[in-house]
Image (tube, helix red, strand yellow):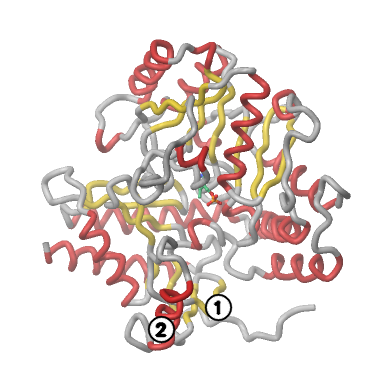
Amino acid sequence: MTTDLPELVQQRNVVTAIPGPVSVELMARRAASVSAGVGAAHPIFAARGGGGILLDVDGNSFIDMGSGIAVTSVGNSAPLVVEGVQEQVAKLTHTCFMIAGYDGYLDVCEKLNELTPGDHEKRSALFNSGAEAVENAIKVARSYTGRTAIVAFEHGYHGRTNLTMGLTAKAMPFKHGFGPFASEIYRMSTSYPLRDSRSGEQAAAEAISRMDAEIGASDIAAIIIEPIMGEGGFVVPAPGFLRALTDYATANGIVFIADEVQTGFARTGAWFASDHEGIVPDLVTTAKGIAGGMPLAGVTGRAEIMDAVHVGGLGGTYGGNPVACAAALGSIQTMIDLDLVDRAKQIGDVMNRQLSALAESTQAVAEVRGRGALMAIELVKPGTLEPDAALTKRISAACLREGVLVLTAGTYGNVLRFLPPLVIGFALLEEALDIITDVVKRESLVG
Ligand SMILES: *Cc1c(COP(=O)(O)O)cnc(C)c1O
């Protein structure tokens, strides 16, 4: 079974005012039917997606520089994902893996065990969302160590459930009014090269001395960190920072968890961002890019840690759903077939070149940073490091009007992040970067 839809034309094309009339109508229905608590970064409704294009309900084609937050890395409705899902959904939609198994779950776990950093013996467990993966990684770490304290970091983001809100650093919009949060969470400062002059080793030494003094190493179950802060604004820590933290964790029997929900699966020009740092986390959490848009998440790690949990302690009704597993297998196969790890590197080179040229030409861009197809610019008031969130918002809206969909991020709301699908054509990518360049220059003069 396949679809008879014509291929989506890989061309930017704005045919109405943005938002167009149909989107405006749907936004009105949305306001009357959907909780106001569910935000809307862009006032448009999507009809189709594929390659580097998102088509809206008014017939506007946007260049997609967000991939639904690093999810559709293989593109929307990627052929192998569509095929896998269609085949699977016709055969078996659900059993609950704990009631009756199916081999797709095993295939995904084997892939995770193979692709995540390190060649030690591993085990995996599957869930529905990134937050759920993070929660389960914490459960596993506590169960294995018999300890309770969890260390997280400034600018970190780990989800919206109660435990993961507690781990997340940013109050607005993620935590405000939603407390109390879980106890035994301690937040340390991270390494943020633009805003802090310390070396990676110095920043880690400070965090370590605080962990020793304020918690006590022998009471820490886990250290959890994103190898590159995602929602925090693609902050790449100074070299040596993560390595020093993993060394400390290993020396003290602490489970080191890399939250690779956003950075994983080829996005950064490696299978996992931890690979760039040469670190081997004890546990890795994955979601977003894993299954081409279907909800799936995983926790993967050292067999002795993952197996320490009592039988029945991990699970959930839908975790590792067969259709989502089929999507993941199609997505991973696409990454291998098209060598999307290498494509991510090439995309990164193109973005870095054009964004660095932009940074040279305007003082509003304080820094270009990221790895591979995960790149950002941080926007400031010229000549200072004062965050300019208003400018960031204006740029994002202006890009949309010109047919380029970008995402914002950052603890101070002043980061534009770029996460194109890894299958985007280079001409389309360069066109998007040209528009972004023009818009940033123009809007930063508005003041
Ligand atoms: C998005 C994200 C999560 C949460 O994932 P959900 O699927 O939204 O629950 C957790 N950690 C990181 C690093 C993320 O980027």
- Label 1: how many residues lie within 10 Å, few (<14), some (14-19) or many (20+)? some
Q: In this view, does 260 lie above or below 219?
A: below
Left or right: residue 252 compared with residue 377: right
Q: How many marks?
A: 2
Q: In which quarter of the image is residue 198?
A: top left
Image quadrant for the N terminus? bottom right
Look at the numbered discs 2 and 1 and tell me whether their residues touch, using CB distance below 8 Å.
no
Q: Which of 365 and 160 is in front in this view?
A: 160
Say which element carries label 2.
loop
Q: Residue at 12% across / 66% down in the picture?
A: 446
> What amino acid type is highlighted by mark number 2?
Asn
Residue at disc 1, secondary structure: strand
Mark 1 lies on residue = 48
- Residue 101: x and y, percent? 87, 49
Q: Residue at x 53, y 80 (%)?
A: 47
Image quarter (top left, top right, bottom left or bottom right) of the C terminus: bottom left
Mark 2 burial class by Cα count in 10 Å: few <14, some 14-19, many 20+:
some
Upstream in sequence: badge 2 or badge 1: 2
Q: Mark 2 points at which residue?
A: 13
Q: Which amino acid does label 1 sit on?
A: Arg
Q: Where is residue 27 in the image (x, y as percent from the top left)?
A: 41, 78
- Residue pictured at 70% horizontal, 65% vertical: 81
Q: Is residue 128 left or right of residue 95?
A: left
Q: Report which quarter residue 5 is drawn in.
A: bottom right
User: Separation of disc 2 and disc 1 at Cα?
Assistant: 14 Å
Judged left or right of residue 331, residue 223 is left
Question: Does the beta carbon of the residue at mark 2 sit less than 8 Å from ligand 1?
Answer: no
